[in-house]
């Protein structure tokens, strides 16, 4: 007997896919599922761990006694009615099933204009939303231990004797498909590695011993090549190092026409960690490093680790990020995309060096524009690790007070340092910063400090709030409720007069609301134009200073600097050293323009989400359907649909604006880079004597000759993109709502199937969710026979 859909889908949703066959063999349907006792569950799920989690899930579906439909002697008068305890995940699951059935019914009908519209709306119902939390910090700062502690997996990410490399991005998220610990390893392409080898050898491989000593990046190059090739690379050409024999263990990398991904699947965190180490870590003198003969992390673009039974990460991904991007173009593009998409960023550092260590502050300063105006970051968390360690632990009675005082002092010092950095202040207010003093080891061991004193629970609470799926569930259910309302409304007869009148009212309201949206956007464009005109003039007068800071940096000798500048022009104006700040000539040349609009940009496109873009004008857009429902009761269903469409298009526009504003902000630097490309290409051709002088001269001459057009052109490109965004918003609003008005008020289709029962169910769900601000357990009444058919 095939397992009923409801039971099978529940097992998949709860992470018990491996038991589906066993449930099928025992013919477990919904009714028998609800009646399972502990002994029967033990036979179905032998292991204690999974069984206890299953029982917890099943408890949420247990039948509760009805109190509203009982006689005086306590007998239930409605044997077909049951009260189920459902979470929002259960509601979402059930509504998806309902809409699947509705869509299947519509597919069997004639493909009328309304039918096609409805099917498109159902397919457009979206629920997947993933929040990214970027985790920065140098090797040894405690990133791995922090992530392990927060998700309560002591041995997932290796730390200690095995040192993290500087290039691999590691994502950690929940495995919602099965009970395995999995890793999805994505490699760079073979062509990209070939180009990278050429660069490594061209700029570093043929240096003299003295030049290598002066070359700050040579150690990083040697480490990368030695990890993959051992000592063989020292006597080989780049071409010979592309031989397939070096990649036999990873055929996914060197084979053509396949997806360059390797999947590892294990039964435990320890097993996965042991298998994963060669793809994410570099060698060490002891520990696990001795067992690994070849290390493949130089070829890895990204690793996604999926952990079972982690509801905390259901809609959240933790991303262990390299501090300064990467020289490999595809890795760097991915890095920038992730940094720009982070809702929150954690800067992890040792508590004893929180305010004095340069690296965490350099990371924050160099990435703040990507996260702020160029991104969507709302929270910066400075996480001071190893907060339980103090120098003198002899007097244990005084240790707790000493730890507390040191932690409070660290928090105030970090906040003061944050307020000092002008570049950060352009993008983030003081309210965006929170400082945590954590002890990952104490949280797991709980020998001296209570869990709350380790502050790990505070970070878990933050992730839980970020993970909250209430808005996603509500959006999906609201959209589905609107679609079913439109279906039933289209079946109604004898409402033509009311439809005609309400259509006139609502179209006039649409015109008024579009004007309200247009005006603040036009004003924003004018303000940006004024700011950018000032920025153009400042750029013309200050470009020499910006050039000098890159081409003639203070306290840097010309002997080794020509190699750095060569890297800059070879990489279109950008050089990422192993240590220290990135050199980005494009950013320097665009800095007066970005300075001119930073403050206004942050006001126009805030990341905090409270107001919304363009002074909240999208949020306030409304056709006032509630008032119209009171006035035109006969077309209530159609107006309910328009209300849900209105909310849906506003959500969609917020997403569009969020992504487009990143491109608008980065257009200043990108346009400068495009204008400078020809200059960089010419500078890269120089070699031999006077290479440094020739590169400097050609860059200076190019900027001098193009200053009157380059900065003005950059301004025009940004303003053009702003105008396009304004036009796209207005067009999307007008066309989407007008089409919805036409289909709901000017179209009848009596052949559409009847979904009255489904509409009533969704109405109950919608009312329940509107009154529930979080994923609390809710009591909703179902007809038993209906639920079983799900």
Image (spheres, rainbow, N blue to C red):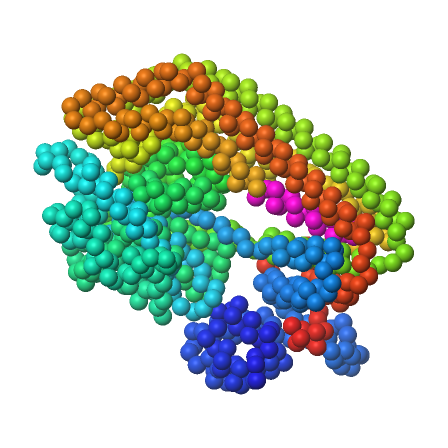
Q: Which residues are magenta?
A: 638-655
> What count of labels does the image hold?
0
Would you say 120 lies left or right of 748 here? left
Q: Is residue 728 above or below residue 125?
A: above
Would you say 444 lies left or right of 96 here? left
- Judging depth in this view, the residue of 267 and 361 nearest the camera is 267
Location of residue 268 (image quadrant): bottom left
Location of residue 587 (image quadrant): top left
- Judging depth in this view, the residue of 255 and 585 nearest the camera is 255
- Judging depth in this view, the residue of 208 and 407 nearest the camera is 208
Identify the residue at image location x=84%, y=41%.
504
Q: Is residue 133 above or below residue 267?
A: above
Where the C terminus falls, by quadrant? bottom right
Q: Is residue 228 above or below residue 753?
A: above
Identify the residue at image location x=48%, y=20%.
712
Identify the residue at image location x=73%, y=65%.
109
Q: Report x, y in % for residue 694.
A: 23, 21
Q: Report x, y in % for residue 266.
A: 35, 68
- Judging depth in this view, the residue of 365 and 436 nearest the camera is 365
Identify the residue at image location x=59%, y=54%.
126
Q: What predominant SS class does the magenta segment belong to?
A: helix
Q: Is residue 729 among the parts visible in the rendering?
A: yes
Q: Is residue 455 above or below residue 658?
A: below
Q: Report x, y in % for residue 776.
A: 60, 60
Q: Report x, y in % for residue 782.
A: 70, 71
Location of residue 332 (image quadrant): top left
Where the N terminus falls, by quadrant? bottom right
Residue 738 falls inside the magenta stretch: no
Q: Is residue 164 among the parts visible in the rendering?
A: no
Residue 644 falls inside the magenta stretch: yes
Q: Residue furthest left?
A: 209
């Amino acid at each position: 007997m095939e397992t009923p859909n409801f039971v099978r889908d529940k097992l998949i949703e709860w992470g018990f896919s491996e038991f589906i066959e066993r449930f099928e063999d025992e013919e477990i349907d919904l009714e028998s599922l609800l009646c399972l006792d502990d002994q029967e569950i033990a036979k179905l799920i032998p292991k204690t761990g999974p069984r206890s989690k299953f029982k917890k899930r099943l408890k949420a579906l247990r039948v509760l006694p009805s109190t509203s439909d009982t006689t005086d002697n306590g007998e239930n008068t409605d044997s077909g009615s049951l009260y189920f305890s459902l979470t929002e995940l259960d509601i979402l699951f059930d509504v998806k099933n309902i809409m699947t059935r509705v869509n299947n019914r519509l597919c069997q009908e004639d493909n009328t204009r309304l039918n096609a519209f409805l099917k498109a709306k159902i397919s457009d119902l979206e629920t997947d939303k993933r929040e990214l939390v970027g985790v920065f910090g140098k090797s040894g700062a405690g990133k791995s231990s922090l992530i392990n502690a927060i998700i309560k997996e002591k041995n997932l990410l290796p730390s200690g004797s095995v040192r993290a490399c500087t290039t691999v991005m590691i994502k950690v998220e929940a495995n919602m498909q099965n009970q395995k610990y999995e890793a999805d390893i994505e490699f760079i392409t073979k062509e990209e590695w070939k180009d990278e080898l050429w660069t490594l050898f061209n700029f570093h491989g043929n240096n003299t011993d003295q030049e290598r000593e002066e070359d700050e990046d040579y150690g990083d190059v040697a480490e990368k090549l030695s990890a993959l090739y051992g000592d063989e690379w020292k006597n080989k050409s780049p071409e010979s190092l592309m031989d397939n024999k070096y990649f036999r263990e990873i055929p996914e990398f060197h084979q053509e026409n396949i997806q360059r991904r390797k999947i590892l699947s294990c039964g435990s965190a320890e097993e996965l960690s042991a298998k994963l180490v060669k793809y994410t870590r570099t060698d060490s003198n002891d520990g696990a490093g001795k067992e690994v003969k070849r290390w493949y992390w130089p070829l890895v673009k990204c690793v996604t680790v999926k952990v079972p039974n982690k509801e905390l990460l259901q809609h959240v991904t933790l991303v262990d990020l390299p501090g300064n991007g990467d020289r490999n173009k595809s890795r760097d593009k991915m890095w920038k995309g992730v940094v720009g998409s982070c809702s929150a960023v954690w800067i992890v550092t040792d508590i004893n060096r929180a305010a004095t260590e340069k690296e965490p502050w350099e990371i924050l300063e160099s990435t703040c524009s990507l996260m702020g105006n160029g991104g969507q970051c709302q929270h910066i968390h400075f996480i001071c690790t190893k907060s339980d360690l103090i120098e003198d632990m002899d007097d244990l009675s005084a240790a707790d007070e000493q730890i507390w005082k040191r932690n409070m002092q660290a928090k105030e010092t970090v906040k003061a340092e944050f307020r000092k950095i002008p570049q950060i202040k352009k993008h983030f207010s003081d309210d965006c910063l929170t400082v945590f003093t954590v002890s990952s080891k104490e949280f797991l061991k709980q020998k001296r400090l209570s869990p709350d004193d380790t502050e790990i629970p505070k970070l878990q609470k933050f992730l839980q709030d970020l993970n909250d799926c209430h808005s996603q569930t509500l959006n999906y259910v609201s959209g589905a409720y609107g679609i079913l309302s439109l279906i039933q409304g289209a079946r109604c007869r004898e409402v033509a007069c009311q439809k005609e009148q309400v259509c006139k009212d609502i179209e006039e309201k649409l015109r008024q609301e579009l004007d309200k949206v247009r005006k603040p956007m036009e004003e924003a464009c004018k303000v940006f134009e004024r700011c950018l005109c000032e920025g153009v003039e400042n750029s013309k007068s200050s470009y020499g200073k910006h050039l000098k800071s890159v081409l003639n940096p203070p306290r840097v000798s010309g002997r080794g600097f020509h190699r750095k500048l060569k890297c800059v022009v070879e990489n279109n104006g950008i050089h990422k050293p192993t240590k220290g700040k990135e050199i980005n000539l494009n950013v320097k040349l665009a800095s007066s323009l970005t300075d001119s609009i930073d403050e206004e940009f942050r006001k126009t496109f805030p990341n905090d989400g409270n107001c919304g873009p363009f002074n909240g004008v999208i949020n306030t857009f409304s056709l006032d359907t509630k008032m119209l429902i009171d006035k035109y009761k006969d077309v209530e269903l159609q107006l309910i649909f328009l209300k849900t469409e209105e909310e849906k298009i506003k959500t969609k526009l917020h997403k569009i604006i969020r992504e487009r504003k990143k491109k608008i902000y980065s257009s200043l630097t990108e346009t400068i880079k495009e204008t400078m490309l020809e200059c960089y290409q010419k500078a890269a051709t120089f070699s031999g004597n006077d290479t440094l002088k020739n590169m400097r001269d050609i860059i200076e001459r190019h900027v001098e000759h193009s200053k009157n057009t380059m900065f003005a052109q950059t301004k025009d490109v940004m303003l053009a993109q702003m105008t396009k965004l304004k036009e796209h918003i207005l067009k999307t609003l007008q066309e989407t709502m007008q089409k919805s008005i036409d289909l709901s008020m000017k179209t009848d289709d009596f052949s559409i199937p009847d979904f009255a029962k489904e509409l009533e169910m969704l109405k109950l769900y919608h009312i329940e969710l509107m009154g529930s601000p979080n994923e609390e357990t809710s009591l909703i009444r179902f007809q038993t026979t209906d639920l079983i058919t799900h």
